[in-house]
Amino acid sequence: MIAFIGSVFSPYYAWSGWRDPTHHCSLNVALYGKRHRRWTMTERNRSALQRTAQSLTIGPSSLTWDGTHLAIAVAERGAPVPRRVRGHIRVTATAHTPWQFTLDEAGRHRWWPIAPTARIAVAMTDPQLTWQGQAYLDTNAGDEPLERGFRCWNWSRATLPDGKAAIFYDVIRRDGKEYGLSLGIGTDGTVQSLEAPPQAALPATGVWRMSRATRSDAGSSARVLETLEDTPFYARSVLSTQIDGAAATSVHESLSLDRFRHPVVRLMLPFRMPRVWWW
């Protein structure tokens, strides 16, 4: 789930000349499963946006943060199949980090892993689903479109047996320079630099042939357990890796900004990212 103010993947925002981020807001909800697969990312204008230091409302959905718990009320409609997606989600942070990281030399792109370890309780009414498990909470902010700053990136996050979160962020900037973060974040929020394991190649996605790579201990193998999203410019996957000598299951993302900025790809996006011009 991602809440956007100034949706970085919005074709409407790009076509506007990146003028007013508050005029391009959306709540992205992705549910995976054989029976209950859903996707929502309806874009709304500034009249649908309300925000305070503790809350964010985008149209009929809202998020409220009290410093430890993030309460989310979802009332959306899916795309391209317009099925309802409704329910309540509660994320409880078990660790907080005070550190914000810049991903480029000019500081235009910033990433903050607010709660690298957390718990989640999901109670959906449409579709009817309930579960509890591990969670993760972060935020990104930027002063320019992503494709101006980067060519591509790979990101992953795993929970190790001691409860520590291992996060790897590898980017190739627009000027061709490579930059990476390799972090171990403890259950108390302590952030430490990890010695980055070597990069491990992964098979391209099945449909759009998105390239993927991750970090895994030398001599170990990294495997794709499941591909959750296979799009022309973005892939989300579940991986089996080894980190610091321990077997780990990682959530992994690959993003190609070179593909994303292609005009044909932008014309395809409204099928999954519709825009409503009213509240």
Image (cartoon, helix red, strand yellow):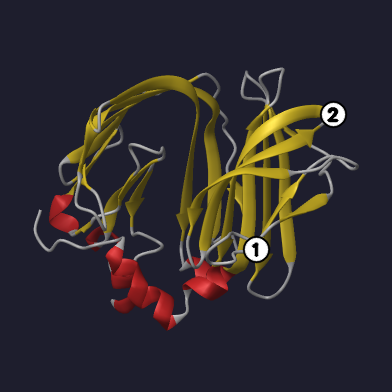
Q: Between tags 1 and 2, which lies in front?
A: 1
Residue at disc 2, secondary structure: loop
Element type where label 1 sits in the image: loop
Whether 179 is drawn above or below 220: the answer is below
User: Which one is in front, 121 or 174?
Assistant: 121
Circle 1 is placed at which residue position?
211
Mark 1 and mark 2 lie on one chain; the one further toward the N terminus is 1
Which labelled disc corresponds to residue 245? 2
Disc 1 and disc 2 in contact, CB within 8 angstroms = no
Residue 256 percent location from the top left of the image: 57, 66
The residue lying furthest to the front in this view is 34
Does residue 194 appear anywhere in the picture? yes
Q: Name the residue: 55% across, 38% down.
A: 113
Q: CA distance from mark 1 to mark 2?
A: 26 Å
In the figure, is residue 96 to the left or right of 29?
Answer: right
Q: Is residue 189 left or right of residue 230?
A: right
Tell me the residue at 63%/59% (across/down): 153
Residue in the image at 67% along x and 25% along y: 190
Residue at x-position 63% and y-position 19%:
187
Q: Amino acid at mark 2?
A: Gly
- Disc 1 marks a residue whose amino acid type is Ser
Quarter of the figure with residue 15: bottom left
Q: Quadrant of the N terminus?
A: top left
* Coordinates of residue 234 in the picture (x, y in percent): 51, 60
